[in-house]
């Protein structure tokens, strides 16, 4: 059950080499509990791995890495227009979205082709093209790592924010997400096309009244056109969060940079991190084994396939410093640094 000095290269989408002192893959909650209670692991730290799409391993892990290979999907009718559908943590996110679309369940179509597994989706409150997990999230089951009891977290308890949740804050390291339940529509779907890129893609396809399946098709086309496939070149998707600044700070920046892109939200303004990075000359730039993607500067790639985690981390630090020096904005890494 337990392996030692296990390579984690195939367990992270950056494809960086790092080893775990101990390693286990679990297929059930009981197996997970058994591993957590092994005497030889009593004083070890634990690292829980999903699809490996949102982590950067900067060094070997001096503890036990556990791959959560919990599979299974179940559903039950909620009312005339809603179904409650539960997916276990180890289910691939995009395959789960396609499963829902095949059954004509609406709510997740804008989140098509996001890498990773279902279990990590609430941690980040993953989002894209006007939709976030919290919009259709009902609850998740978690394992309390101290008591080994199963607890239920509803939307309020998860405290979702922009790419944020309780699992990234005070709950970090205290819980493992076992499964997630979503409340999806079965008939009267809410179609979200407010993001310009989706509208443009639908026009290209000559679609005027899109179905949820056609929205998914448009999102997939957009993502494939500008984001590298982790199976082909190592990356973790968007490396940085889009920063939010005060309206006052934005007005000052706008005087200096009239073309600055922004999304106002009351007294706050969200500025696209990709635009900031590009303005600092980082789009497509390569240093050693690491580069930003030539089509999307928000994505850092393992360009040669030979980068180590520290190289990628240092590259991201250089970007943060450039943006802060030019715009006075400090970018925050979206990727979990190990």
Image (tube, rainbow, N blue to C red):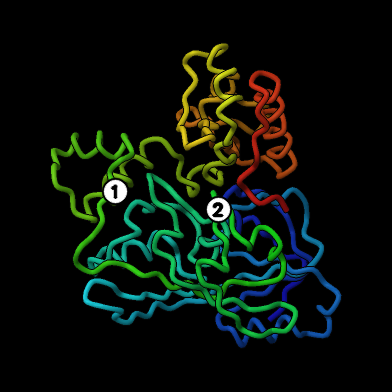
- Mark 1 crowd level (few <14, some 14–19, many ≥20, 10 Å Cα): some
Q: Using the image as rendered, state which of residue 163 and residue 112 is in the foreground.
A: 163
Instruction: Quickly name the residue at label 2.
Output: 161
Marks 2 and 1 sit apart, C-alpha to C-alpha, by 20 Å
Q: How many marks?
A: 2
The answer to whether one can see residue 284 in this image is: no
> Could you say whether the residue bearing mark 2 is in a helix, strand or loop?
loop
Tell me the residue at 24%/55% (across/down). 212
Above or below, comparing residue 72 to residue 240 in the picture? below
At label 2, counting other C-alpha atoms closer than 10 Å, the crowd grade (few under 14, some 14-19, many 20 or more) is: few
Name the image quarter holding the N terminus: bottom right
Q: Is residue 216 above or below residue 32?
A: above
Q: Earlier in the sequence, mark 2 or mark 1?
A: 2
Camera-side residue of 269 and 226: 269
Q: Is residue 281 visible?
A: yes
Residue 268, given in percent of the width and then of the height, sits at 54, 35
Q: Which mark is residue 192?
A: 1
Nearer-the-camera pick, 143 or 218: 143
Q: Residue 296 placed where, x, y %?
A: 48, 31
Residue 160 numbered tag: none
Disc 1, SS: loop
Horizontal and vertical percent position of residue 8? 67, 59
Q: Name the image quarter holding residue 69.
A: bottom right
């Amino acid at each position: 059950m337990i392996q030692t000095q296990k390579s984690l290269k195939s367990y992270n989408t950056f494809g960086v080499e790092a080893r775990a002192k101990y390693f286990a893959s679990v297929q059930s909650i009981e197996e997970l509990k058994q591993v957590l209670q092994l005497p030889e692991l009593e004083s070890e730290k634990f690292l829980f791995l999903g699809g490996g799409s949102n982590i950067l391993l900067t060094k070997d892990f001096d503890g036990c890495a556990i791959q959560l290979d919990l599979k299974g999907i179940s559903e039950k009718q909620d009312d005339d227009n809603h179904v409650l559908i539960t997916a276990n943590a180890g289910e691939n996110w995009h395959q789960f979205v396609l499963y829902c679309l095949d059954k004509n369940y609406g709510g997740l179509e804008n989140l098509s082709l996001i890498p990773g597994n279902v279990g990590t989706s609430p941690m980040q409150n993953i989002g894209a093209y006007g939709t976030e997990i919290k919009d259709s999230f009902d609850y998740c089951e978690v394992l309390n790592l101290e008591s080994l009891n199963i607890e239920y977290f509803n939307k309020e308890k998860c405290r979702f924010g922009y790419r944020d949740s309780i699992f990234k804050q005070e709950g970090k390291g205290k819980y493992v997400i076992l499964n997630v339940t979503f409340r999806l529509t079965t008939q009267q779907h809410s179609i979200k096309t407010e993001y310009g890129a989706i509208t443009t893609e639908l026009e290209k396809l000559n679609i005027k009244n899109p179905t949820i399946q056609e929205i998914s098709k448009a999102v997939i086309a957009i993502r494939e056109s500008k984001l590298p496939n982790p199976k082909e070149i190592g990356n973790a998707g968007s490396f940085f969060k889009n920063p939010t600044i005060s309206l006052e700070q934005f007005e000052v920046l706008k005087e200096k940079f009239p073309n600055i892109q922004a999304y106002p939200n009351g007294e706050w303004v969200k500025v696209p991190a990709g635009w900031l990075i590009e303005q600092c000359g980082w789009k497509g730039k390569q240093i050693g084994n690491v580069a930003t993607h030539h089509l999307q500067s928000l994505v850092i790639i393992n360009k040669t396939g030979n980068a180590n985690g520290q190289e990628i981390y240092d590259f991201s630090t250089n970007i943060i410093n450039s943006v802060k020096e030019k715009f006075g904005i400090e970018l925050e890494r979206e990727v979990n640094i190990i």
